[in-house]
Each structure stands twice: as structure tokens, then as C-alpha cells.
Amino acid sequence: MRVYLDHAATSPMPPAVLDAYVDALRVVGNPSSIHGAGQAARELLETGRDAVAASIGADPAEVVLTGGGTEAVNLAIKGLYWGRAPRRRIVVPDGEHHATVDAVEWLASHEGALLDRVPVDELGRIRVDALADVLGAHADDVALVTALWANNEVGTVQPVAEIAALAAAHGVPLHLDAIAAYGQEPIDVRALPGLTALSLAAHKIGGPAGVGALFLTRTAPVEPLLHGGAQQRARSGTQDAAGAAAFGVAAARAVDGLAERSVRIGRLRDRLVDGIRAAVPDAVLCGDPEPGGRLASNAHFTFPGCDGDALLFLLDLAGFAVSTGAACAAGVSEPSHVLAAMGVPEDAARGALRFTLGDDTTDDDIDALVAAVPGVVAQARAAGLSSREPTLGR
Ligand SMILES: Cc1ncc(COP(=O)(O)O)c(C=O)c1O
């Protein structure tokens, strides 16, 4: 049996999205062309954009379509940084996604940005008190605040209303990376008055990879990253009508029945958490244990005495696709910077495993995983922590 429990990495395309995508790919025409073929492509493009905008309560004119989530995050962070020159400071929490971490570090090393780091607590929640202190001390020189809506590794949902209120009170633009939260938490950009920019990616909700969007308020001071035909405000390049069409279908599905879906997936997640706790009593659940404090789809554990890579490979052999949650550099997993920011010791962090559920997850999937985990943990423990190479087949 193959069980896919890595929806946070990418989520399978439902048939309705795939059909819309394939149909749209057959349409010939550049959306910027004025002939009929171009206008047909334009129609697909704008219908997709409308649905994406509606899914977050935005106006279509506020949605810039991008080539994926990483581009959206980079456009928000670098674009706002340059657009707010000569301000030098970027306020950024610990434990952000690498799209943010690497973008702000690049700005620091190449453009002289000053990074004001905001700690997270032991559940991975941004310390709003520390954010208030930083803004209180330096607001005049802050180009932007950027933060995750929900953490992609441990699933902790951030106090975005408080963060937005603080940014608004200090008159500083706020970018939220909502890529992990999209389709799981209700997102209404109008409910967050301090919000200037918000990043989305289609493939996390069953749309195509390489298709994303950046919500940008009309007055957002953003310098484009790509220069060319000025097809969109803040982004040049021929627009991907098929990608937008598929994104639009996925976006509509993601918000339609979101509350019921969260309840169903959250119940499966609780079954998984309870099952693993019973089967491996020393496994430690990371992130917020309260249902409202974490994404319904996320269960993240550390297994003492195990190497997460070994667990991942053994589970893969047993038919389960899961993740260590942490990024890979050149094929070698680094201990998670998110867990480090939460104060998890490096040894414990090496035994991390993330399970993320989706629409196709069933009770049987969860029960099969829970039945497989104790044997896999015993094997990984026997292999020991001394080697970081997986010892499969021994
Ligand atoms: C929170 C978060 N931000 C940014 C990204 C990057 O998005 P993409 O893979 O579409 O470039 C991801 C995807 O892993 C993510 O989970």
C-alpha cells in the first residue's frame, strides 16, 4: 500500500484541477495579444485570478501572479525593502521558511539590510512582546515586517491579528507568508488592516507547482524584481493562463467547505497523534498541542535515539511518504532551524518526522501508519545515531 502523508511538501492535483489545467493548456494565445486567441487566454487568466483573489477576500487588481511561492516571497521581501529605501531594517522571526531566511540574509549580505530577529517560544509561536519591543525601538527605520501565517514544519499557527495590529500601529508594511496556511486556515486580507503583502502557492492546495500569487495592496511600495513587458504591476513576463486557470479551480475548492474539511482532517490528525503516542510513548509532539494552535493537517514528532532520515527511508520502504520537515542541502538533511529556534536540542531534532494529511487521507491510512511506526522506530534506534547514513536492509 502507498500512503501519501507529505501534503505540506506538495498536494496531489484533484481531477477537477487537472482537467481544468489540461483544457487550458490546449488554448493557444498570449493573454496580452489583442486578437481573439489572446483574449481567450486572457479570459482564462482573469477567471483564475478572480478565484484566487476571492479565496483571500482580495480584489483581483491586488493579485500578482508569480512563478511559485518562492518568487512571491522574494518579491514581497526584496520589493518592499527596495521600495522603502533608505530604511534599512527588516523585522523577521526565527524559524521562517528558507524562502524568507535566504532572501533576508541575501539582502543583509548584498544590500546592507539590518535584520531584527524576533524569537519564537517553545511551541514555535512568534513572541509578540519581542516584536512590539523591536518596532517600539526602531519603527522609523523598518522597511518591513515579514512572518509566516503558519509554520510549515511544526504547523504552529501564528498570532497574525496581533502581528498585523502592531505593524499597522507603527505604520510599517507587513508581509505574511501564508503558503502553509492556505486552504487550511480562513484567510481574509481585509480583516488584517496592517497587511501589505501575502504570499500563496498553488501546489500546496492541489494546483500546479511553479504557480503562485502575491497579494499586494494598491499602494504597496514595491520595486519589481523582473523587468520587461510590465504585464502585471510589479511583475513582467508573459502570464501563465493555464497555470492561473488551474490555480483558480484549486483556490475555489480550497475555501469551499474549508471548515468541514478542517474538522475531518483534524480528527484524522488526532487519531494519528494519539496512535503514535500510544505506540511509541517517548515520542514527543512538537508545536502547539492545542487543536486551534496548529494546522489541522500537521503532526510533527521527534523520536528519541532515531535519525529522521533513517525513519523516513524505512517508512518509504514500508509504503509511507513522510518528511523530516527540515530542508535538505545537497542531499544531506540539516537539523531543523525551526526546532533549534524552539529550543529543541540538536540530538532530539535529528529524530524529527512530519506527517501532513490531505483530502485523500483515510482512517485506514492512519491505522496502517500507526501500526508500522513502532517497528520502524526500533530499527532506526538499532541503527543508532552514530551514523547519519541510512542503514537500510541490515
Ligand atoms: C511556508 C512556505 N513558504 C514558501 C514556500 C516555497 O513555495 P514554492 O515551493 O511554491 O516555491 C513553501 C513551500 O515549501 C512553504 O511551505
Image (tube, rainbow, N blue to C red):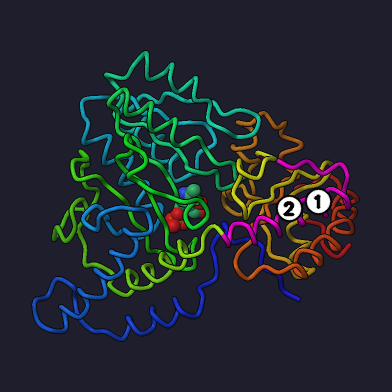
Question: Residue 179 appears at what percent x and percent y?
Answer: 46, 52
Residue contact between numbered discs 1 and 2, judged by CB atoms under 8 Å: yes
- Give residue 79's mark: none
Q: In the picture, residue 147 is in which quadrant?
A: top left
Q: Left or right: 40 with respect to 351? A: left
- Give residue 274's mark: 1
- The answer to whether 69 is drawn above or below residue 20 in the figure is above
Asked whether 146 or 325 is in front, the reply is 146
Is 271 one of the magenta-colored residues? Answer: yes
Taking the view exactly as shown, the residue that stands out farthest to the top is: 137
Is 69 one of the magenta-colored residues? Answer: no
Question: Residue 252 appears at what percent x and percent y?
Answer: 41, 67
Residue corresponding to mark 2: 270
**Element at label 1:** helix
Could you tell me how far apart the alpha carbons at marks 1 and 2 are, in whole angstroms? 6 Å
**Element at label 2:** helix
Residue range (magenta)? 260-287
Crowdedness near tag 1: few (<14), some (14–19) or many (≥20) residues, C-alpha within 10 Å: few
